[in-house]
Amino acid sequence: DYVIMHAIQSIGSRWEPVAAFLSHGVGSYPILLLVFFIALLCIDKWRAAVELLIISVVSFGILTLLKHYFGIDRPYVIDPSLTYYDNETSFALPSGHALMSVVILGWVAIRHPKSHTLLWGTILLVILIGASRVYLGVHYPSQVVAGWLFGILILFVAHSLGKRLWTPFRKRLD
């Protein structure tokens, strides 16, 4: 964790505005959710928009439970010698930005599987958001990876449940 964290932070303060934008602008999960929810509504993807809203609310609840269960402090609290450019008050494990970016962007990518641009854009944005959290000093790399893994698990369960619940319902409608 320390080696990777110091390597990312060795960029210096010149990346701070970009990292802050990735964390609090485009990578902020309320903003991500709002943008994609409205975008899906604008292209008449009502079901996908409602699914995105539901999976996001459930994921945020799971995230809150996980943070309190693990109860691990932020890196700058554990080791005051670390550089930090941001100050967070919640627990650190798992990274909420990492988990929620995987869930929100991943759900949109799952619902639009033919878009390779969306898939690669999702992967790149999720990685950049995670790296920004490490750079800002609010997460160790392992906490970001844990967020990604929990996010992938939530996506897998939601997608599997969606198939199991929707298919019988759809057959009844037909």
Image (spheres, grey):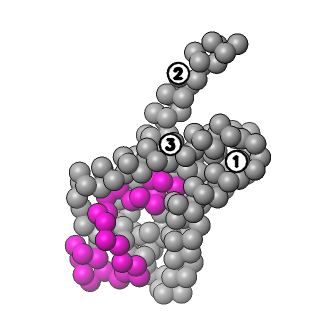
Q: Amino acid at mark 3?
A: Ile
Residue 164: give its label: 2
Q: Foreground residue, 166 or 73?
A: 166
- How far across and down, in percent of the image, does residue 90 sit? 31, 66
Q: Are marks 3 and 2 in contact (CB under 8 Å)?
A: no
- How far across and down, in percent of the image, does residue 174 sit? 70, 13
Q: Amino acid at mark 1?
A: Leu
Judge whether residue 172 is colored magenta.
no
Disc 3 to disc 2, C-alpha distance: 16 Å
Disc 1 to disc 3, C-alpha distance: 15 Å
Judge whether residue 100 is colored magenta.
yes
Q: At numbered mark 1, what does the secondary structure look like: helix, strand or loop?
A: helix
Disc 2 to disc 1, C-alpha distance: 23 Å
Of the numbered discs 2 and 1, the one sitting upstream in the chain is 1
Q: Amino acid at mark 2?
A: Arg
- How far across and down, in percent of the image, does residue 59 sit? 43, 46
Between tags 2 and 1, which lies in front?
Answer: 1
Left or right of 11 in this view: 43: right
Which residue is identified by label 3? Answer: 55
Q: Foreground residue, 70 or 57?
A: 57
Q: At numbered mark 3, what does the secondary structure look like: helix, strand or loop?
A: helix
Of the numbered discs 1 and 3, the one sitting upstream in the chain is 1
Q: Residues within 10 Å of mark 3 (few under 14, many from 20)?
A: many
The region drawn magenta spans: 76-101
Say whether residue 29 is visible.
yes
Q: Residue reaching furthest right?
A: 43
In the figure, 83 relative to 152: above or below?
A: below
Residue 5: give its label: none
